[in-house]
């Protein structure tokens, strides 16, 4: 075994962490009889030799040995090695990348990585006949991994297609059968010449197969390959299949005993997946539904109907899947989610902790859209014990991104192109970390972000206890005047904070909450923080304190000497924040306008100019003398400078001839500027009538303006809903004041 491994000069090759002289040990570890040693070796291969999907010269040198290991029936866990080979050889360059690669000289530094991908694919394709004999391997884990490897790597797709379809007639393992169907769908997507017949075959299988799970898999893959041909009755069709699967009590991955813990990333991921599937008769339905949701794409009403049907299922696992799937749906698409949110709130009372965890995580990110679940959240908080609860994340996690991943026992029967914890598609957030704060705090954050005043006494109790999540303090601004009763508690907490290197992290959330609560009685404590800021992140500490003083307004008169001193600070953020606070306290523009004009100079960075313009806009007509300093910024190369300057100039002078075209151009240029622009348009009223079509168009869009592939932020949904509210307000004011 591993013949010739010593003949390779591994030390001259490299991987992610330097010379590859440790690779022989990793390869031997993959063949070890010890399961822990095999897992450690696999973790090392992914961590160094195939780090984050990269292909190094050492990765290429490993390919013959990995193929040898796969072919040896005496090697255990070969399914994992098949997946590793699939990942190494399955990276496909797009046309632009291939064109760039072909135009580079061989010794160009950019050529080597791209060339390595191509050479890896060619090398594994050349040896991929080894996979043909593994479709009937006695090890079900091998049979689970091989179909996607064949669909992705074998150079004869027609041969593979025939083999996969034939194997389906004799295969008895449920997840392997699903993997075979998913691989057929992958071939159809990759090879247009085979697509029509494959789509027809999948359609036949979706109707004719006896196993409802197989019918659902075929339906999902047909939808994926031909999304334009998804039938109108897909929701009742899928719902009926899910009910068949539930009543049949199909055994799935959750019925297998968990393996021992391993101190590796792969081991941790495996344990999380085993925990997720435990106690569920058919955990594989989640991946099938994710594939179907991705195919339905902008058919939002159908997707909502499907989620609602799942949320009403007697199977807690289906309800949990619905919540995670809806996380990606609501993050990307606008729609009527009131009933969905209400039903998710109902899950907070379920005895299954994983379902409660999913519901809490989902509701945390909804802000005002979480209102239909407010009663359920309040009831949950009223009876929940204090201290660590059952949360398993901070609301930022999800199981995959809708593109494949670890759906099955060892590597996924989806399309295999995704990974665990990307969480930005049909998961709900940036990744699943498995480390959870209090589920009680998550529910309280959701209730406060929904603006429900029942959160106030619960927040007060939390502030009297131990450490509080930052998000809980930042949620105070959603509670309006009712938050004022929290000010004494916030003040006490701020007074106890040491003025050390960690001051910003500890003080900033409290300062934000005090500003929202208008806790003027905390003025001495705020000044203590302002004056005692340490060198570490001093500017950010001061800016946070100055924002709080500005919120206190005239009642912060004691701070005036400090504010005047900081007007001359060398940091634009501090200087402009001091100007804003001084204006809020004294209401006299004479002292602050020269400071703000100084930070508008064209030679300064865009962030500095934006900060100054923002404050001038807040001052409004009283800052008219600064208008000449704002006008040059309308032609800045920095979009955000143009937006801030145009909004400020309108608020200062009421001019629309010069400002409105700048705002409308920026609207089209950068969608992330639309909330700020819409806020200004709403203030303009009829003066912004030229923007009517732009506003109406935004309101007709189904996709959220800030939806991003592969990323999401906690406030994304809130910001998009704010944009819609501002667009409606702007149009309403145009109509009202025109007539």
Image (cartoon, rainbow, N blue to C red):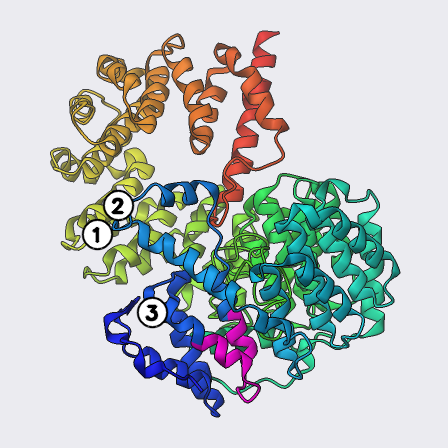
Q: Who's the residue at 51% across and 75% down the image?
A: 81
Residue 128 against residue 158 in the figure, above or below: below
Relative to 440, does residue 299 appear above or below in the rendering? above
Residue 545's disc is: 2
Using a 10 Å C-alpha cutoff, classify the residue at mark 1 as few (fewer than 14 neighbours), some (14 to 19) or many (20 or more): many
Measured as percent of width and height from the top left, residue 267 is found at 48, 78
Q: Earlier in the sequence, mark 1 or mark 2?
A: 1
Task: Identify which residue, 580 or 270, lies in the foreground.
Answer: 270
Residue 58's disc is 3
Q: Nearer the viewer, residue 49 or 537?
A: 49
Q: Is residue 556 magenta?
A: no
Instruction: Report, in whole angstroms, how far the alpha carbon at label 3 lies from the one at label 2.
Output: 53 Å
Q: Please state, as top left, top right, bottom left or bottom right, where the N terminus lies in the image.
A: bottom left
Give x and y (percent) for residue 690: 51, 11
The reply to whether the C-beta atoms of the residues labelled 1 and 2 are less than 8 Å apart is yes
User: In the rendered view, does 654 fall on the left or right side of 615?
Assistant: right
Left or right relative to 589: residue 401: right
Query: In terms of sequence position, does the residue under pointer 3 or pointer 2 come before the other?
Result: 3
Q: Place residue 666 in its image quadrant.
A: top left
Q: Residue at x 35, y 81 (%)?
A: 5
For label 2, the SS is: helix
Q: Residue 529: which numbered mark, if any?
A: 1
Magenta span has 78?
yes
Report, in whole angstroms, how far the alpha carbon at label 1 lies from the one at label 2.
Answer: 7 Å
Circle nearer the viewer, 1 or 3: 3
Question: Helix, strand, or loop for circle 3?
Answer: helix
Q: Indicate left or right for 628 with 426 as reference.
A: left
């Amino acid at each position: 075994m591993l013949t010739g491994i010593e003949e390779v000069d591994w030390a001259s090759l490299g991987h992610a962490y330097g010379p590859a002289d440790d690779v022989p040990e990793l390869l031997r570890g993959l063949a070890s009889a010890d399961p822990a040693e095999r897992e450690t070796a696999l973790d090392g291969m992914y961590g160094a030799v195939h780090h984050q999907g990269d292909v190094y010269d050492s990765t290429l040198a490993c390919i013959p040995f990995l193929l040898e290991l796969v072919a040896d029936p005496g090697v255990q866990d070969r399914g994992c090695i098949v997946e590793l080979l699939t990942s190494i050889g399955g990276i496909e360059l797009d046309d632009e990348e291939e064109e760039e690669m072909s135009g580079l000289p061989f010794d160009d530094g950019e050529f080597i990585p791209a060339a390595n991908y191509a050479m890896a694919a060619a090398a594994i394709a050349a040896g991929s006949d080894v996979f043909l004999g593994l479709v009937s391997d006695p090890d079900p884990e091998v049979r689970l991994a091989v179909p996607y490897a064949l669909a992705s790597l074998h150079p004869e797709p027609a041969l593979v297609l025939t083999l996969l379809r034939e194997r389906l007639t004799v295969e008895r393992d449920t997840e392997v059968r699903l993997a075979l169907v998913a691989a057929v769908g992958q071939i159809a997507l990759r090879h247009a010449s085979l697509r029509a017949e494959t789509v027809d075959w999948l359609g036949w299988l979706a109707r004719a197969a006896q196993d409802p799970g197989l019918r659902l898999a075929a339906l999902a893959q047909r939808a994926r390959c031909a999304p334009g041909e998804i039938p109108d009755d897909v929701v009742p069709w899928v719902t009926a299949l899910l009910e068949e699967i539930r009543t049949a009590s199909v055994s799935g991955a959750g019925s297998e005993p968990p393996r021992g813990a391993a101190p590796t990333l792969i081991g941790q991921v495996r344990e999380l997946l085993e925990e997720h599937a435990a106690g569920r008769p058919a955990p594989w339905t989640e991946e099938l539904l994710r594939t179907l949701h991705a195919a339905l794409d902008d058919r939002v009403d159908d997707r909502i109907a499907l989620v609602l049907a799942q949320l009403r299922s007697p199977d807690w696992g289906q309800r949990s899947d619905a919540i995670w799937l809806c996380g990606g749906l609501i993050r990307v698409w606008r729609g009527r989610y009131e009933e969905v949110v209400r039903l998710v709130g109902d899950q907070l009372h379920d005895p299954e902790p994983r379902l409660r965890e999913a519901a809490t995580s989902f509701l945390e990110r909804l802000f005002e859209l979480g209102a239909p679940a407010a009663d359920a959240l309040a009831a949950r908080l009223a009876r929940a014990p204090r201290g660590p609860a059952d949360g398993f994340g901070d609301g930022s996690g999800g199981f995959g991104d809708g593109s494949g991943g670890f759906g099955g026992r060892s590597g996924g029967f989806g399309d295999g192109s995704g990974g665990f914890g990307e969480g930005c598609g049909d998961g709900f957030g940036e990744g699943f970390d498995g480390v959870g704060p209090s589920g009680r705090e998550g529910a309280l954050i959701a209730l406060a972000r929904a603006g429900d005043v029942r959160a106030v006494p619960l927040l007060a109790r939390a502030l009297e206890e131990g450490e509080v999540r930052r998000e809980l303090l930042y949620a105070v601004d959603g509670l309006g005047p009712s938050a004022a009763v929290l000010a004494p508690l916030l003040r006490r907490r701020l007074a106890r904070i040491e003025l050390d290197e960690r001051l910003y992290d500890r003080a900033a959330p409290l300062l934000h909450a005090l500003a929202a609560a208008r806790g003027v009685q905390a003025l001495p404590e705020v000044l203590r923080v302002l004056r005692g800021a340490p060198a570490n992140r001093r500017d950010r500490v001061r800016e946070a304190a100055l924002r709080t003083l500005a919120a206190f307004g005239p009642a912060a008169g004691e701070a005036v000497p400090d504010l005047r001193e900081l007007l001359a600070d060398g940091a634009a953020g501090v200087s402009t924040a001091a100007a804003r606070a001084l204006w809020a306290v004294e209401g006299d523009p004479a002292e602050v306008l020269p400071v703000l004009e100084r930070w508008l100079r064209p030679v300064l960075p865009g962030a500095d100019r934006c900060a100054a313009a923002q404050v001038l806009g807040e001052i409004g007509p009283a800052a008219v003398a600064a208008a000449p300093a704002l006008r040059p910024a309308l032609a800045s190369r920095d979009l955000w400078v143009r937006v801030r300057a145009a909004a400020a100039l309108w608020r200062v002078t009421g001019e629309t001839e010069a400002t409105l075209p700048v705002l409308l151009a920026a609207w089209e240029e950068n969608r992330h500027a639309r909330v700020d622009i819409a806020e200004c348009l709403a203030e303009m009223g009829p003066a912004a009538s030229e923007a009517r079509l732009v506003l109406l168009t935004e309101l007709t869009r189904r996709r959220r303006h800030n939806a991003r592939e592969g990323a999401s932020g906690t406030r994304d949904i809130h910001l998009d809903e704010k944009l819609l509210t501002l667009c409606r307000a702007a149009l309403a004011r145009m109509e009202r004041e025109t007539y």
